[in-house]
Image (cartoon, coloured by chain):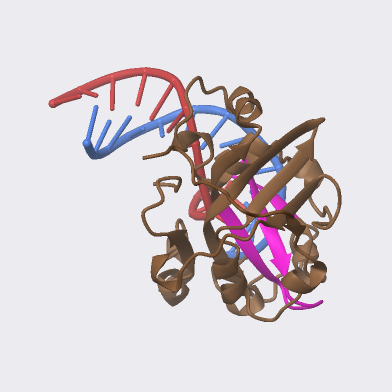
Chain colours: A brown, B blue, C red
Amino acid sequence: MPAFSVCCSVTSFQKLPLAFYRRDDVVQIARELLGKYLVSLIDGQYTAGMITETEAYRGASDRACHAFGPRRTPRTELMFGPGGTAYVYLCYGLHHLFNVVTNERDQADAVLIRALEPAEGVEVMQQRRKQKKVTPKLTAGPGNVSSALGIRKQHYGNDLTGTELWIEDRGIVIPEADLVDTPRIGVDYAGDDARLPWRFTIRGNRWVSR
DNA sequence: ATGTCGATTTGCT
DNA sequence: GCAAATCGACATA
């Protein structure tokens, strides 16, 4: 059993274009992001990992979303802008959580990236995370993803077609049968919306939180 | 293996 | 004031 998925026969890694993010169905986008690669070139360090866990947050109509209401504040305003930017915010006062803003202007949808399978720059990730061993703890859990890739609040608003932080299609397709949906984590306060099956993982992949 | 607790920004009551 | 899209250190078993 190999430690990492094998990536093969792909000649070009395609950076996802703005059109990918600006579509109307955030739940579908959250599904499609599984198997894509989140890449960062931050502080001169190149790190990348395959996305293994996502959660969809559907704008003003979703009680679990910061933009529910609609709630427009200096922090959430970015989500009301057009898709293709990085919504980074501080959770519980210390964890930087990385989200992808989707949909068109005024539709405040976003996808939270919750876990990665490390691909490149693993040693850099270990240094940032202060981990001697490579285990799922390295990149499982949204706070750990940001920590491993060097994502901080200064990356709030970054253009995801830019040179610091982006997502690539490397030709990996997750079969529909291997796509697992469950309720989202840590949103008990959201009433009925807390039960929506909008958290997505890859069946059998060990690089997931919890 | 499981549980409690502290760190500490943002935004609502 | 308090709860939050969390995590890891530490305690106990």
Residue beneath the point at 63% across and 61% down:
A171
Residue beneath the point at 50% across and 64% down:
A174
Q: Which one is in front, A117 or C8?
A: A117
Q: Which one is in front, A11 or C3?
A: A11
Residue A141 is situated, as x and y percent measured from the top left of the image, at 51, 45
Determine which quarter of the picture holds residue A150.
top right
Image-based side of A43 in relation to A109, left or right: right
Which quadrant, please, contains the N terminus of chain A? top left
- A118 to A124, vertically: above or below: below
Residue A110 is situated, as x and y percent measured from the top left of the image, at 66, 66
Determine which quarter of the picture holds residue B4.
top left
Q: Main secondary structure of the magenta part?
A: strand
Q: Answer whether residue A106 is magenta in the image.
A: yes
Q: Answer whether residue A39 is magenta in the image.
A: no
Residue A178 is situated, as x and y percent measured from the top left of the image, at 40, 65
Q: Which one is in front, A50 or A194?
A: A50
The region drawn magenta spans A87-114
Residue A35 is situated, as x and y percent measured from the top left of the image, at 56, 58
Residue lying furthest front? A9
Residue beneath the point at 54% across and 69% down:
A31
Image-based side of C5 in relation to A102, left or right: left
